[in-house]
Amino acid sequence: MADTLTREEKLYRIRHTTAHVMAEAVLQIFPDASIAIGPPIDNGFYYDFDLPRSLKPEDLEDIEERMRAIVAGRHALTREVVGKEKAREIFQDQPYKLELIRDLPEDVEVSTYTVDTFVDLCKGPHVESTAEIHPKSFKLLTIAGAYWRGDEKRPMLQRIYGTAWETPKELREHLAWLAEIEKRDHRKVGRELDLFSTHEAAGPGLIYWHPKGARIRGAIEDFWRAEHRTGGYEMLYTPHVGKSWLWETSGHLDFYRENMYSPMELDNAEYFAKPMNCPFHIMIYQTAKRSYRDLPLRWGELGTVYRYERSGVLHGLLRVRGFTQDDAHIFCTPEQVEEEILRVLRFSMHIWSAFGFEKVKAYLSTRPEKAVGDPADWDRATESLRKALETEQMEYELDEGGGAFYGPKIDLKIQDALGREWQMTTIQFDFNLPERFDMTFVDRDGREKRPYMVHRALLGSMERFFGVLIEHYGGAFPVWLAPVQAVVVPVAPAFDEYARTVAERLFAAGYRVEADLSDNRMNAKIRHAQQQKVPYMLVVGENEQKADAVSLRTRTGERPGEMGLGAFQEFLTARVQGKELI
RNA sequence: GCCAAGGUAGCUCAGGGGCAGAGCAGCUCACUCGUAAUGAGCAGGCCGUGGGUUCGAAUCCCACUCUUGGCUCCA
């Protein structure tokens, strides 16, 4: 392989070729199989097959063995330009390939790649020889169903996902990363730390927050409210259901009904659980004639919404049917838009940094083909978004035409401790609802004008954010969020009373501190606190009791040792205020 | 919704036509302990739900339901 290739290019080739090798292995087992597509993807590759029977996990081992044998043959990858006619002949027994050939543009050079006995329709590129693939640097991971061309109406194929790297070491590191993801899985950690649950019998996709989860949420919400207050927001509380009039006016019944819970009938009227908070905030806006002097209005709400998600897509806290958005709507004049967007963006970055997320990527989505509203407004809005990003010197990707039909937006994706990206924040213009509800404000010149409306959710939803937060920290929350900030561990029952006093004093000072007065031995208590990822363990015995002190041990295993109770309280206060991890 | 794998004690899991199992957690008792598990005992189950096959079903078959991995990466 040429040394001039970047690492990305090399990996692309390795993964692509490995996918072909896998297809050959599968064809050895199922000579009559139809093959679909097999591209390289992030961290690996996949290939889709139409097979006479369902694959079993054991099949993967068999396929992998065969792949190693093929790779060991050090086969050259040969490219041949064949033209559509010839391609049709070669793949006459491969219906999916024929469809691909049919859909290829006329001016494209149709080529095949051959490795060993396997010929595939492929534009490449590939490695030059399978000698470049280390037999221990790839691994097949999972079997999945996938629709041909991602279309639910087309046949369901069987997809095999694999991962492939340049060296066995990289493969091992990748597998370790996958193991770490599994270890931090918020569903697992949520159970171990007693944070939340779901109940299939009581309704799938609905979250129950246990006391310890609720403590964390409480800490998040307290912080969130305080920041919004100083950030110039007012808070609202609005109902959970609304009559069909509201949803007809908003347009949700026309465009969003399939995501809404079925209506309840009361007094010959239909009420729907809210999938969004916006129409309610608009109702409040409409209770007064608004002047330009009132604007901007920044109204926030931790609003719980319900949306129907198909059963197959529900996933722990990350994809649910009921969740609380940290929602806000900004109503402002066209002149204020630029300033307001900049404020929201700065505010978001401030919040993300407080939660320990420093890497944030921005995505700007502009006007799609089908859109409502005056193009001049779109331009102004889009420009304000772009300007805000540039003023903040944030790198962003442009998604031209990727906006919703009702307005352009900025999405922020945060990167977690494992390098995964999560889309959380959205700052979204809306040129639809102000029109539909005929919202107005009276401008300086005495004329009624249409206000600009911006939706924004920073954390997104409390549930989803909690899920990401759990995985980001692996359950070892920073002190200010930890459900139990410190556990007092008496060395023997004789010191239970003192332990209780210590815990009560710290609790009274506003901290989440508990004494472990179970009849376990000290070592077991420490182990338990450690497993619960409690930041601080305060060991107390005769020495500490005499000195009105505690002996500090951190969950990271450090032992600063004995310190006065007052000193520890100061220490704790500083850590909490500084939002320290430990 | 579709494909696949699953659902056995609170949790993690074994068993797979003939008495329902283990570890951890829980409870009781003893031990009175200095930085990651003291010991002994006890209790705990409609084997996801409904139907079928069978002398007999947690186990085999069917349906449903929930959970999990996917269904966006385009030769």
Image (tube, rainbow, N blue to C red):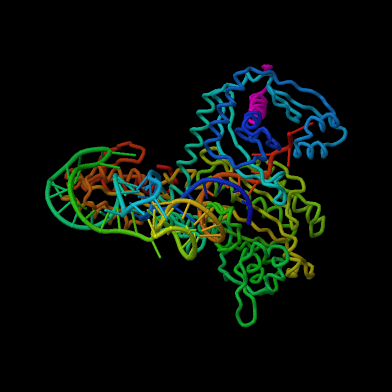
Residue A12 within the magenta-colored segment of the rendering: yes
Is residue A205 positioned above or below A262 on the image? Answer: above
Task: Point out the stretch of residues depicted in magenta.
Answer: A1-22
How many marks do you count on the picture?
Answer: 0
Is residue A102 positioned above or below A66 on the image? Answer: below
Is residue A554 positioned above or below A437 on the image? Answer: above
Q: Which quadrant of the figure contains the C terminus of chain A?
A: top left
Magenta stretch, overall SS: helix
In the rendered structure, the answer to whether residue A78 lies left or right of residue A167 reads: right
| Residue A227 position within the rendered picture, expressed as x and y whole percent measured from the top left | 53, 55
Q: In the picture, residue A258 is in which quadrant?
A: bottom right
Residue A193 at least partly seen: no
Residue A539 within the magenta-colored segment of the rendering: no
Q: Which quadrant of the figure contains the N terminus of chain A?
A: top right
Q: Relative to the observer, which residue lies in front, A347 or A430?
A: A430
| Residue A158 position within the rendered picture, expressed as x and y whole percent measured from the top left | 63, 41
| Residue B34 position within the rendered picture, expressed as x and y whole percent measured from the top left | 20, 38
Q: Relative to the observer, which residue lies in front, A567 or A545?
A: A545
Q: Residue at x 52, y 36 (%)?
A: A58
Q: Relative to the observer, which residue lies in front, A159 or A198?
A: A159
Q: Relative to the observer, which residue lies in front, A136 or A580?
A: A136
Residue A406 at least partly seen: yes
| Residue A335 position within the rendered picture, expressed as x and y whole percent measured from the top left | 74, 57
